[in-house]
Image (cartoon, helix red, strand yellow):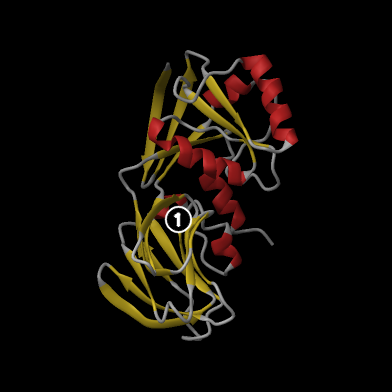
Amino acid sequence: MLTLFSSFTSGAVQRKTLIMTTKKIAFLAGLKPQSKAAQAILVERYGNVSPEEADIICPIGGDGFMLDSLKAYMDLGKPFYGINQGTVGFLLNTYDVDHLQDRIAAAEETVIHPLVMTAEDIDGVKHEALAINEISLFRESGQTARIEIWTNGQKRLPMLICDGVMVATPAGSTAYNLSAHGPILPMSAQLLALTPISAFRPRRWRGALLPQETIVTFKIIAPDRRPVSGVADNFEVRNVVTVDVRSDINRNLTLLFDAGHSLEERIIREQFET
């Protein structure tokens, strides 16, 4: 059983001090040998239960495995405490066998909302997928993509000529969005970043900041001659015609971070990296 001792709320970010009264942890491991080895050590020390039985879900691996775990088990309503055995580990905590229960008890909590991608392909088939970081559109051929951009049913940009475009969450704003020169968004901002990828025209358009509740619609111009893919994190739909993107503000994902290393703090620190 997980007891909430105290809470503080600021915008979209919630932090709570957690007291573990029952030590039920689900350790999930990625495919890499180091993740499997770390899982074996942690299971021997702390035991293991299924995600359905757990109070805390602990994915062990890299950021990609963390994203997969969040999407696979988000509907269980359990908090996630990721353990890094990958490269960057932006969404994860440092691996340490000792004092895990104490670290979880003192962890800072961040609540995030996933994006929903609804894409229709050139054959009229509709696809839906969730994303934690971003939903991106990419050209599939040597020709540039040509994309109309709408927000809340209003046409905003009649033609973006580009390699692609994305909508990023605050949690994902320091990932691919940052590499494409998009803005870093604090977790409490309740905004989405609309960021072009190698835009050719309009040459000076650098994207937009949108309220979290905005529905963004992309319409592909000449999809038969200039094919485009829609990608929700790592789930791809080929040959899309339209893509709608919205935040699922009614679905909460709870991530736990070691004290002093919250996701919001990491995002703030990222803005001062040189």
User: Can residue 24 be seen in this snapshot?
Assistant: yes
Q: Amino acid at mark 1?
A: Thr
226 relative position to 152: left or right: right
Which residue is label 1 attached to?
169
Circle 1 packing at 10 Å, graded few (<14), some (14-19), many (20+), is many
Image x and y of residue 257, in percent: 55, 36
Q: Identify whether 35 is placed above or below 233.
A: above
At 55% from the left and 82% from the top, the residue drawn is 143
Residue 187 on image: x %, y %: 45, 50
Quarter where residue 74 is shown: top left
Q: Residue at the front extreme?
A: 123
Residue lying at 58% horizontally and 20% vertically, measured from the top left = 101
State the residue in front, 28 or 8: 28
Q: Quadrant of the C terminus?
A: bottom right
Residue 223 or residue 260, whichever sits in front: 223
Residue 88 in the figure: left or right of residue 74 = right
Which residue is at a point 54% across and 24% down the rendered structure image? 26
Residue 196 visible in the current orientation: no
SS class of the residue under badge 1? loop
- Looking at the picture, does residue 226 appear above or below residue 152? below
Looking at the image, which residue is at 55% across and 52% down? 267
> Quick one: 188 or 127, which is closer to the camera?
127
Provide residue 253's location: percent of width, then percent of height. 42, 39
Q: Position of residue 99 (x, y in %)?
A: 65, 20
Question: Foreground: 186 or 210?
Answer: 210
